[in-house]
Amino acid sequence: MIPTPPGAEDHRPAVHLHLEPTPARQRQVRGSGPDRPALLADEFFLIAHDDQTGRPRLHPSAITHGLAAALLGELAAEGRISFDRGHIYVLDHRPPADALQHLILDRLVGEPQHTATRTWLSYLAATAHDEVARRLWQAGKVEPQQQRKFLRTVTVHVPTDMNVAAWSWARLSTKLRQYEDLDAFDLALAGIASSCRLDQFILDGAPYAVGAHLRRLLAAAPQPMRELLADLDTAIGHTVLSHRT
């Protein structure tokens, strides 16, 4: 276990994000949605890339930091870690069933001297895109394709089913435009998307009140979730500034 910082013994609650799908969540919204990934980083990946071409909708650094946050959110949902005052605390060393979650937890446990959330967001961002893309490919959700771009070859992960790829953002868009509450999973997904400025895509053309509704929901989110999103906001802000200088 990562040692508790001095003076924090009575402050840090042993809580996590509770993002795991509930029985109600497993029913498709409006009864029309396709089967979809039940993993936070997988859903964010699909939202962050065009559902037909697989091309990114954001600057790569915003996508990779969002994916890093989503991977940490998955571990929090499994009760393995929590967030408090800018730090990550390992609550449970037992390996999760998912191989990628297991890998991320091993990294956290193996570096107990590093607890700053922003440090881990930057570290995980370096490999998050390839790791999540591989998990989606293994699940049959995307297919890597080599494409030429500006005299160089890039790998684009094209969705194998456009309806599955579009379902993540369409579900959030519909719920928010109808001023519905979001369960913890969708709230975390919407929060990460908002931090990465993907809310502009999800809510394109929606009245101002819809965005205000999302902000109210995020303001009332569980404390660990708000801690993670605040550190993600800061990390992305610093990344943007570094690209401008």
Image (tube, grey):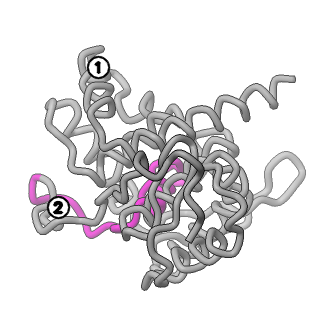
* 10 Å crowding of disc 2: few (<14), some (14-19), many (20+): few
Q: For this rendering, which residue is in front, 103 or 80?
A: 80
Number of the label disc, if any, that sits on residue 25: 2
Q: For this rendering, which residue is in front, 99 or 82?
A: 82
Q: Main secondary structure of the magenta part?
A: loop
User: Which quadrant is the C terminus positioned in?
Assistant: top right
Residue 197 in the image: state x and y as whole percent: 51, 31
Q: Does the stretch in magenta take in 136?
A: no
Number of the label disc, if any, that sits on residue 10: none
Q: For this rendering, which residue is in front, 145 or 230?
A: 230
Residue marked by disc 1: 212
Q: Earlier in the sequence, mark 2 or mark 1?
A: 2
Q: Is residue 48 above or below residue 32?
A: above
* Residue at image point 79% right, 56% down: 148
SS class, disc 1: helix
Q: Amino acid at mark 2?
A: Arg
In the image, farthest residue toward the top: 208
Q: How many marks?
A: 2
Residue 40 in the image: state x and y as whole percent: 41, 60
Q: Does the stretch in magenta take in 49?
A: yes
Q: Amino acid at mark 1?
A: Ala
* Residue at image point 66% right, 72% down: 107
Numbered range of the magenta stretch: 30-54
Residue 57 in the image: state x and y as whole percent: 57, 41
Q: For this rendering, which residue is in front, 138 or 195?
A: 195
* Residue at image point 46% right, 43% down: 192
User: Which quadrant is the N terminus positioned in?
Assistant: bottom right
Report whether 141 appears left or right of 218: right
Q: Is residue 233 above or below residue 25?
A: above
Report whether 72 appears left or right of 28: right
Q: CA distance from mark 2 to mark 1?
A: 24 Å
